[in-house]
Image (cartoon, grey):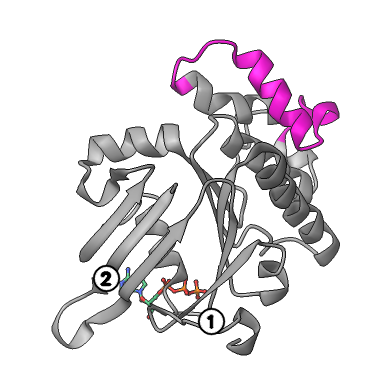
Amino acid sequence: MVLEVRDLHKVYGRGANEVAALRGVDLEIEEGEFVAIVGSSGSGKSTLLNIIGGLDSATSGEVYLNGIEITGCSDEELVMLRRKQIGFVFQFFNLLPQLTAYENVALPLEIDQQKDIHERVVEVLKLVGLEDRMEHYPDQLSGGQKQRVAIARALVTKPNIVLADEPTGNLDSRTSKEILKLFYETSRKHNQTILMITHDLSVAKFADRIITLKDGKILEGVDGNETL
Ligand SMILES: Nc1ncnc2c1ncn2[C@@H]1O[C@H](COP(=O)(O)OP(=O)(O)OP(=O)(O)O)[C@@H](O)[C@H]1O
């Protein structure tokens, strides 16, 4: 099991301002699975992803990544965990504009002082189909190409899990399909575990499994499309 979430709760604010964003979430994801979490705005998707990614703390409950309880980690441990075990892909790509595609992808390996950086960077850029755009800067790339660079950057450290937050939210439908196919193939061919959140069921349908969140809880026994 790559990811295990146990009875996760998150409460924001206090007193009259209290919001229960997660109300007892249980979740298990196996190695190589491509899982989508769907739910309407405010259902708790980002909160769940942020806690799994070590970017936010839980009020109670546990999250285990590859058997390590991340809900019990210190801030320093979380920094290392995010660097080595988690790849992030965001809606707005979050590339560094002053670095080329190659340099953006190499950065996580350089921060980690890894060896054989060149081979690995070229390998993932080929994987995402951008070997002929390595020296381009983000503003010389299309939206889909930028997202491919971001995916290459997420994959380059060989993370246990890739967390993708509305990865196609800023792309047209044809480009979205290409990016979703890339996720699908990466999970199949490279056994990469991917957890993606989206409010769009047509996007979620590319995943192996769809989980529906509603009011901070997972809906049991229903397909995503019955609830959106
Ligand atoms: N920092 C915060 N402080 C207070 N309440 C928050 C905070 N972040 C989120 N919430 C509340 O928690 C609930 C869940 O929010 P969350 O962002 O996780 O939902 P979401 O499903 O990702 O929504 P969207 O699709 O609109 O991004 C919402 O009611 C939201 O208003």
**Left or right of 165 on screen, residue 122:** right
Camera sees residue 2: yes
| Picture quarter with the C terminus | bottom right
Q: Would you say residue 127 sits in the magenta stretch?
A: yes
* Residue drawn at x 70%, y 45% as measured from the top left: 188
- Answer above or below: position of 72 versus 45: above
| Residue 20 in the image, given as x and y percentages of width and height | 28, 79
**Labels 1, 2: front one:** 2
Which residue lies under the disc numbered 1? 40
- Does label 1 point to a residue whose CB lies under 8 Å from ligand 1? yes
- Does label 2 point to a residue whose CB lies under 8 Å from ligand 1? no
Q: Residue furthest top?
A: 115
**Left or right of 134 on screen, residue 190:** left
Three-letter amino acid code of the residue under disc 1? Ser
> Which numbered dot is residue 9?
2
Three-letter amino acid code of the residue under disc 2? His
* Residue drawn at x 53%, y 78% as measured from the top left: 39
Between the C-alphas of marks 1 and 2, the distance is 18 Å
Q: Residue furthest left?
A: 15
| Residue 76 in the image, given as x and y percentages of width and height | 25, 35
Give the quadrant of residue 19: bottom left
- Magenta part of the protein: which range? 111-137
Q: Would you say residue 72 sits in the magenta stretch?
A: no
Q: Residues within 10 Å of mark 2 (few under 14, many from 20)?
A: many
Q: Secondary structure at mark 2?
A: strand
Q: Secondary structure at mark 1?
A: loop
Give the quadrant of residue 57: bottom left
**In the rendered structure, which disc, 1 or 2, sits on the residue that comes first in sequence?**
2
